Amino acid sequence: MALSGLEIFKLLPKTNCKECGKPTCLAFAMQLAQKKAKLEDCPHVSEDAKEKLAAAAAPPMQLVKFGNGDNEVQVGRETVLFRHEEKFYNPTVLTVTVSDKLSGEELNKRIEKINSLEFERVGQQIKVNAIAVVNESGSSEKFAAAAQSVKQGSELAMILCSDSPEAIEAAVSKTSDRVPLIASAKEDTAEQMAKISKDNKCPLVVKAPSIEALSQLSEKVKSGGVENLVLTLEDKSPRESLYNSTRMRVLSLRKVFRPLGYPTISFIQGDESEQVAAAASLICKYSNIVVVDAAEPEVILPLLTVVMNIFTDPQKPVQVEPKLYSVGEPDENSPLMFTTNFSLTYYTVESDVESSRVASYILVVDTEGTSVLTAYSGDKLNEKVVADAIKKSNVEEHIKHRKLIIPGYVAVMSGKLEETTGWEVMVGPRESATIPKYLKEVWQ
Amino acid sequence: MPIPEITESFAGKVNRLTLGATIEQGGTRTSTVTVGGAENVVYGGSTEDSGHKPVIAMDVLDSRPDDWPDVLAENYKDVMESPADWGKKCVDEFGAELICVKFDGIHPDKGNKDAEHAVKVTQDVLQAVGVPLILWGCDDDEKDNEVMPKVSEAAKGENVLLGTVTEDNYKSLTAIALADKHNLITEAPVDINISKQVNILVSDMGFPLERVISFQATGALGYGMEYSYSIQERQRLAALSGDKMMAMPVICDVGYETWRVKEARQQDAAGWGSAEKRGPIWEAVGAICLLQSGADIIRMRHPKAVEIVKNFIDNVWQ
Ligand code: SF4
């Protein structure tokens, strides 16, 4: 967090020598705080002060990357507690585990299954983007072998999970080119783990039983030269996890408490239902990497959707491309309706049209990503805009009839729209949910 | 380095509100439900600051729904004709602490049933279950104004939660809720200013703000959930800052919203996994997300989803 003018002033020589071009050190400090002056302009500032100022300017939460190439992932550098204050920046990395007790065919099947956890929703690809290899066997060889298989079988970023430095050493030696995240260093293994992390340039998870112990450990590891850290607390109940995660986020962002200024990882425990619940809540509440055992699409798709929703920029409405869309396989007699290019509006309409099982055309009109009512009241939706969209989309070549279903909320534009386009306007329902009924009963 | 203290002094907190009235309190309920009371943001401060446990209200429809997918409908197929049996099943088998009777069947497009029907349903459900009720209209202004006052009267003394009133349609329901001493849901279309405005309007009619629950409109997971999420977070922050017009507990409708999206409904979807599990998980995850942003009551439908969320609440709230 940036320092105030007064805090900066305390670090200056306070001689008022004017060499910076300002009348006093205080005036210089104030300008510096407002970024209207540069620190270099003061020739007398001490090295110590320079360091402190630089440190204060650093973001409160570290950015950590692991994996390589196209599959590199990055977590951290969040700036706010509530998404509406700004936005959440780096989407939670949803990770699925592979046990090193598996081998051969079973292991490969598991890897394949995780690789396939990729979905398209509302025009975007979403996927599981890391695999955690877990040292459940207790054997370093098996762990290294499993890590090797994962490396061969998947492009995804890797997390190597073992409390044993020997096992980590063995697995990292096979996979270091993939820049795996090492999990985890504890109090008693911190030195050895830090060395492996440093030697192989892989980021490191530090684990401790309490926030207090965790901040001490992260300090210690950092002073040993490892800066790419991820934090985790040992085996906590869902309640403790959520309260601790929130407290850590507040301490790192609001208090700029550097020992906790790193992204966090959660290893989710419990049966499938418990994992679903804990994972969903921890995605919302500040865990930057969430590791689950569940690899079923019906569990992963909703969790990935949570990540997508929560990390959407609240300042920027998500838009779809304004053009003609087909739902089902419409023909020249199929209904045509229009809606706006605010993605939420569009996908709601699309979903309802789909459930009607009446093949249809949806003409998406460019309203700069606003909903029907907002667009209409802001004059981003009027008869001209719709007429333009009709022309641009070439919809006249796709259908024989000249009937256009319009959203019920803008029934008032019917007259002008008929005049401008020469089309017959049919007023559709106000609520998208009533579209199926409308298409079945009123259309035709 | 010592860990800094987090000191937060909030000027306000979320109102506490109790639903239902026992015999001693002039009703016939065998249990009541208290919600609200949070004194910090969700998981902020200590567990004592979190207020009362959030509660799930299970939906009972006044008329047999014809558009529920099998995965959902099969849980209620033996009781769909009888709201009373339906409510009883929710309480006895699925552990519901609160029932929301949704009067879809009175909607002009969905059966257009009359007030007599709605009153009978209300009486039957009140007889069949001992838990408090939410009585929720059909969202057609004219029909709600005609029917819901009679429903309110039929539940007089039971301290129910009545809904919903909006910026454009609040007078008749607010008046009757006031007369019958019920609680009221104020609804706004994901717009915090309108939400506040509705609260001001009902307050101007003399309705006590401590008996109001806010409904910010709910988006299903993947369908605008994040809008409701952020509005609810903003409402909680406003409540904590001392804004009396925003200090009410919050209700969400995850059940209805979930069961109209394709991820929950669609049976045969390649790559989406088991349809049987997908719908309930979709509903549960949507509900759990909204709990993170400060929901106090959540309307839900699938028993499995209810179970997952109830477990979560029991694990996290004291
Ligand atoms: S040059 Fe440095 S020491 Fe001199 S007045 Fe400016 S800030 Fe103060």
Image (cartoon, helix red, strand yellow):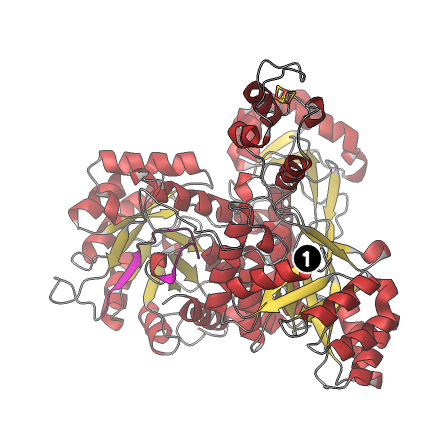
Query: Percent position (x, y) of residue B171?
Result: 26, 37
Question: Could you tell me which quadrant the N terminus of chain B lies in?
Answer: bottom right
Relative to B42, B125 lies left or right: left
Q: Nearer the viewer, residue B260 or B245?
A: B245
Q: Which residue has dot 1 on it?
A: A223
Quick check: B222 above or below B61?
above
Q: Quadrant of residue B51?
A: bottom left
User: The residue marked by circle 1 belongs to what chain?
Assistant: A
Asked whether A173 falls inside the magenta stretch, the response is: no
Asked whether B42 falls inside the magenta stretch, the response is: yes
**Residue shown at 80%/56% (left/top)?**
A72
Query: Percent position (x, y) of residue A367?
Result: 64, 30
Instruction: Write the start and end of the magenta stretch as one range.
Output: B31-47
The amino acid type, in three-letter code, at marker 1 is Ser
Q: Nearer the viewer, residue B227 or B179?
A: B227
Q: Nearer the viewer, residue A357 or B21?
A: B21
Relative to A26, A118 lies left or right: right
